[in-house]
Amino acid sequence: MNLYAIVLAVIVVVLLGLSISQIRKVKTRADYLVAGRSLPWYVLVFTLLSSWVGSGSLFGGAENAFRNGFAALWQPAGGWAGLLVILVVAPRARKFAQFTIPDLLEVRYNTAARILGAIAVLFAFTAITSYQFKGGGDILHLIFPGLDEIARSQFHLAGHEHALGMVIVAAFVIVFTALAGMTSVAYLDVVIGTLTTGTCLIALFVVSKRVGGWSGLHQSLPASHFQILGPFTFLKAMEYFMPVFLLMLGNQAMYQKFFSARSERDAKVAVFGWIVGTVILETVIVTIAVYGSALFGKNPAVAPREIIPYTARHGLPSFLGALLMGAVFAKVISTANNYLFSPATNLVNDIYIRFVNKTVSDKGVLLVSRLVVVALGIFALLQGTLWDSILAMALYAYTIYAAAITPAVMAAFFSKRATATAAVTSIALGTLVTIVWNLQVLAMRDHRPTFIPQSWLTHDAIFPALAISLLSLVLVSIVTTRPRPEQWSPFLSNQA
């Protein structure tokens, strides 16, 4: 067995052991869904960082950096800008202290908002989970090149790239997530976040020396790779910036962590640590990808989205490369855990408990939660077969959430005037426009007719979907009856 496989196996065993060790702590619904509301700030920092930085950054963002250089930083910069707003929202969210974003939507608006919110989260987060599976499959393919041949000859999986690797990763994540819920996810993230951040910093230093430092990088790449906009127009830069910015503002996985915090102070302090960690780690990831493109960009065997694990495999000393490969794999697992767990929480808390079985016991909640995790994991795996580009999948998922959920959530924390009818309309239209737009993109890719002009479909759905969502939220609020004070006071009590 090669060194890369050994390191990967050790990481998997350690993570699985940590997850199993947390099972005995899970006895109630609150233990499973929000870790008993017991997480201190330093655990929150790492679990927030690990849930945010996954395949979207390590594969989608790296693909962007490979092609476009440092202009790829427009994508993570959306998250950094969003974090400045989150500094205000985090303590308010912990004070509210429910389980999910649809909980919040029902309290502030109505039951219809809860249901539509749960549906939007399900589509967005299973899409995010699906490209974690794809990223994990890429890593297994690089470590075990024979997997594709096994997939074709033994399992007849010849139509999808790295299909067997995706299935293996999906199975592992599903088991992992079902075991201990939020408690397992949060404490695993401490280990994964420490490993990934430290390994990436060392790897950046080593790969920089191999290229010849900053001057060597300039000599190897076109000048556009070092410009603020690079090859982008300002509109294109905003198409990368805005979905991430708006996802950050309304991200249920983040709010669920805030609901899990030990106190309002822990929630706010954690955001400061998260800002520092996110800026450092995402900048390092983009920089490694740019250095990797200087080393391997002319190699036709290199898939742009795989540049970081490929650099780990072929551009670093064996042990460091194995550690980086293992760290990337662990991050993919961590992010998949978070984004699979979150919509499962919605279906159980917002649909099953709310409308199907209101008197279910804690033991029953745990059983149903684990079954839902399995079902959604399979659904996410199927979605992973629809897209070739992780970057495209990431932007689709971010846009659903940004257009459907974030406007209504931000209005809950900052507006007394937003009405229930307006929120329901905004969520429904934001979701619908994004899904229809991206179905049209897939139709164009397959050379089928489209009713949206194809010149429009070369752009992301974020601006049309967001414009329709915001416009409906504002206009419908104006023409409908103001909400009662008891509807907005839990979110704006300091402004009453």
Image: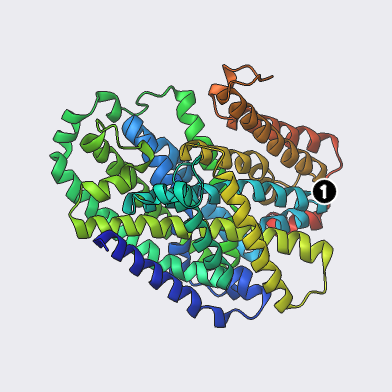
State the count of labels: 1
| Farthest bottom residue in view | 24
Residue in the image at 44% along x and 65% along y: 189
Q: Along the horizontal axis of the image, is 155 left or right of 259?
A: left
Residue in the image at 69% along x and 37% along y: 430
Residue 457 visible to an observer of this rendering = yes
Which corner quadrant of the image does residue 30 belong to?
Answer: bottom right
**Badge 1: residue crowd in 10 Å (few <14, some 14–19, many ≥20):** some
Q: Which residue matches tag 1? A: 483
Q: Position of residue 387 (x, y in %)?
A: 53, 37
Q: Position of residue 286 (x, y in %)?
A: 33, 42
| Farthest front residue in view | 153
Q: Along the horizontal axis of the image, is 271 left or right of 410?
A: left
Question: Where 96 sits versus 75, above or below?
Answer: below
Residue in the image at 29% along x and 31% along y: 300
Q: Which sits in the foreground, 293 or 411?
A: 293
Q: Which sits in the foreground, 476 or 345?
A: 345
Which corner quadrant of the image does residue 459 belong to?
Answer: top right
Q: Along the horizontal axis of the image, is 471 left or right of 309?
A: right
- Amino acid beneath label 1: Pro
The quarter of the rendered structure image containing the C terminus is: bottom right
The quarter of the rendered structure image containing the N terminus is: bottom left
Q: Secondary structure at mark 1?
A: loop
Which corner quadrant of the image does residue 492 belong to?
Answer: bottom right
Residue in the image at 29% along x and 24% along y: 224
Q: Which sits in the foreground, 488 or 225?
A: 225
